[in-house]
Image: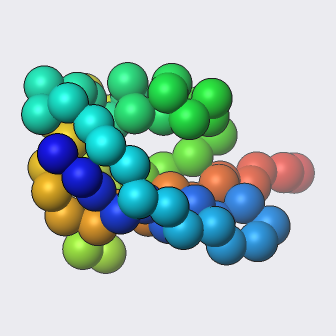
Amino acid sequence: MKIKVKIMFGGVKEQNLDVLSSSTYEELLGSLHINPEIVLIFRGGNPVPLDEKVNQENIEILRVVTGG
């Protein structure tokens, strides 16, 4: 299935990806070489768990910045 991904890491990059319907969001991040511990994934403005199966909606990947 095809999904549209917007990656927001300092800049914004959009790409269309072909993923298996059995893939999880964590597997999707792995295929993009993105560490799942430093990002949040949003679908329709709501965060999604990494172990959830990817669906055909557009997603946004946002890098989380922490500090003290």
Is residue 29 toward the left or the right of residue 56 in the image?
right
Residue 52 seen in the current view: no
**Image quadrant assignment for residue 54:** top left
Judge from the rendering whether residue 55 lies leftward or rightward of residue 37; answer left or right.
left
Tell me if 38 is positioned left or right of 11 in this view: left
**Residue 53, how many percent across, how many down?**
15, 35
In percent of the image, x 38 and y 49: which residue is there?
17
The x, y position of residue 3, in whole percent, is 28, 56
Residue 54 visible? The answer is yes
Indicate whether 14 appears above or below 27: below
Percent position of residue 61, x then y: 50, 57
- Residue at 58% of width from left, 61% of height from top? 7
Q: Where is residue 14 in the image (x, y as percent from the top left)?
A: 54, 68
The answer to whether residue 4 is above or below residue 25 is below
Going 38% across and 24% down the picture, which residue do you hit?
Answer: 27
User: Does 43 sit above or below residue 66?
Assistant: below
Is the image coloured rainbow, by chain, by secondary structure, or in one colour? rainbow
Count of numbered tags: 0
Indicate the quadrant containing the N terminus: top left, top right, bottom left or bottom right. Answer: top left
Residue at point 84% right, 51% down? 67
